[in-house]
Amino acid sequence: MVERVIVIAAVAVSGAQGLTTAGLVVAAKSVFRRREIDRDPHAAQYFLLGTLLSIAVAVLDGLLIRHVGG
């Protein structure tokens, strides 16, 4: 949930530059989930799909907010 708020805010405020923030969020999240991913091979799939879907929704929300607000 926190990652979505960060990405939505970054994209809504700075547009395409907010995508850099999205990349940093994914990188940070993967560092913190490293042990879990190493232990369970299926966890990597769930992590990747879940994170990408969450980030995609957040980017679209941020772009919508930027378009409607501007």
Image (cartoon, rainbow, N blue to C red):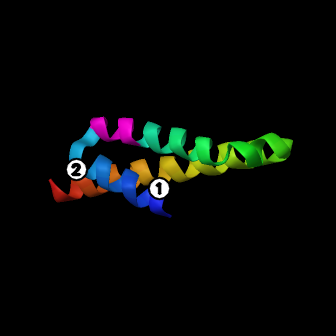
The residue pinned by badge 1 equals: 3
Q: Which three-letter amino acid code belongs to the residue tagged 1?
A: Glu
Q: Identify the magenta region.
A: 16-21
**Dot label at residue 20:** none
Asked if residue 22 lies left or right of residue 53, the reply is left
Residue at position x 78%, y 48% from top? 43
In this rendering, the answer to whether 37 lies above or below 54 is above
Q: Nearer the viewer, mark 2 or mark 1?
A: 1
Residue at position x 40%, y 60% from top? 5
Magenta stretch: residue 18 in it?
Answer: yes
Give the main secondary structure, helix, strand or loop, of the magenta stretch.
helix
Crowd class of label 2 (few under 14; some 14 to 19; many from 20; radius 10 Å): some
The answer, for residue 45, to whether it is visible in the render is no
The residue pinned by badge 2 equals: 13
In this rendering, the answer to whether 64 lies above or below 35 is below
For marks 2 and 1 on the same chain, the one whose residue lies earlier in the sequence:
1
Q: Position of residue 37 (x, y in %)?
A: 76, 44
Q: Quadrant of residue 34?
A: top right
Residue at position x 50%, y 64% from top? 1
